[in-house]
Amino acid sequence: MYAINPSKKDFNKILSNINGLTTLTSPNGKMVLYSDNNLSLNIFNIDTENSLLLGLKTLPEKCVWSTENTDLLYCAVPTNIQSGLYPDVWYQGLTSFSDEIWMIDTETFTTNLLINPPDTARKEMDLIKLQLDPDENFLLLTNKKDLSLWGLRLK
């Protein structure tokens, strides 16, 4: 992963030598959420160059950073991950997940389960395109299985 600075016309290597690397940079550009081919979720602090394993397994593209509180993340986390070559098998549609929704505080490194869709919506969901509304009252989600749109009230 490289950071590009268009005004200086340069780029810097941030992360490398990680099989299956996928990333999601925080809005302030200080933290990088990333996973590897085991879907192990990590936080990398660009200033300190320290990395911390979060203890959850998912893809960063199944997450969204808060812009109100840049220490918060919301992620769709699979309850069961079948063996396979990740992230490729998920991108190719060869496997699907049943996700829970978690909130992660990157300052305290705490994780909280917010909801398990099969318990509340009576439906398994492989969630993608997580978004927060401008006031961050709602988390908007798309179910990859049928492209239906869902919302979760946060406040």
Image (cartoon, rainbow, N blue to C red):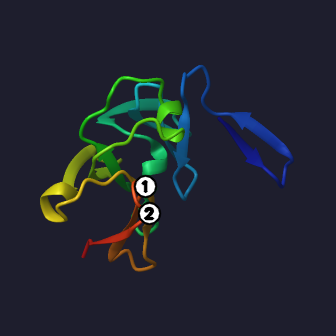
Tell me what residue is drawn at x 41 percent, y 31 percent.
39
Please, what secondary structure does the residue beneath circle 2 have?
A: loop
Q: Position of residue 22 (x, y in %)?
A: 54, 37
Q: Nearer the viewer, residue 109 or 114?
A: 114
The Cα–Cα distance between marks 2 and 1, rounded to whole angstroms, is 5 Å
> Which residue is denoted by mark 2 in the rendering?
147
- Contact (Cβ within 8 Å) of mark 2 with mark 1: yes
Tell me what residue is drawn at x 19 percent, y 65 percent.
121
Is residue 26 found left or right of 9 in the rendered image? left
Q: In the rendered structure, which amino acid carries the disc numbered 1?
A: Lys
Please, what secondary structure does the residue beneath circle 1 have?
A: loop
Q: In the rendered structure, which amino acid carries the disc numbered 2?
A: Leu
Q: Can see residue 22? A: yes
Q: Residues within 10 Å of mark 2 (few under 14, many from 20)?
A: few
Q: Nearer the viewer, residue 93 or 44?
A: 93
Q: Can see residue 115? A: no
Q: Position of residue 84 (x, y in %)?
A: 42, 24
> Which residue is denoted by mark 1 in the rendering?
144
Q: Quadrant of the N terminus?
A: top right
Tell me what residue is drawn at x 24 percent, y 47 percent.
111
2 above or below 20?
below
Is residue 37 found left or right of 13 in the rendered image? left
Q: Position of residue 155 (x, y in %)?
A: 24, 76
**Would you identify the image quadrant in which residue 47 lies?**
top right
106 above or below 149?
above
Tell me what residue is drawn at x 20 percent, y 51 percent.
112
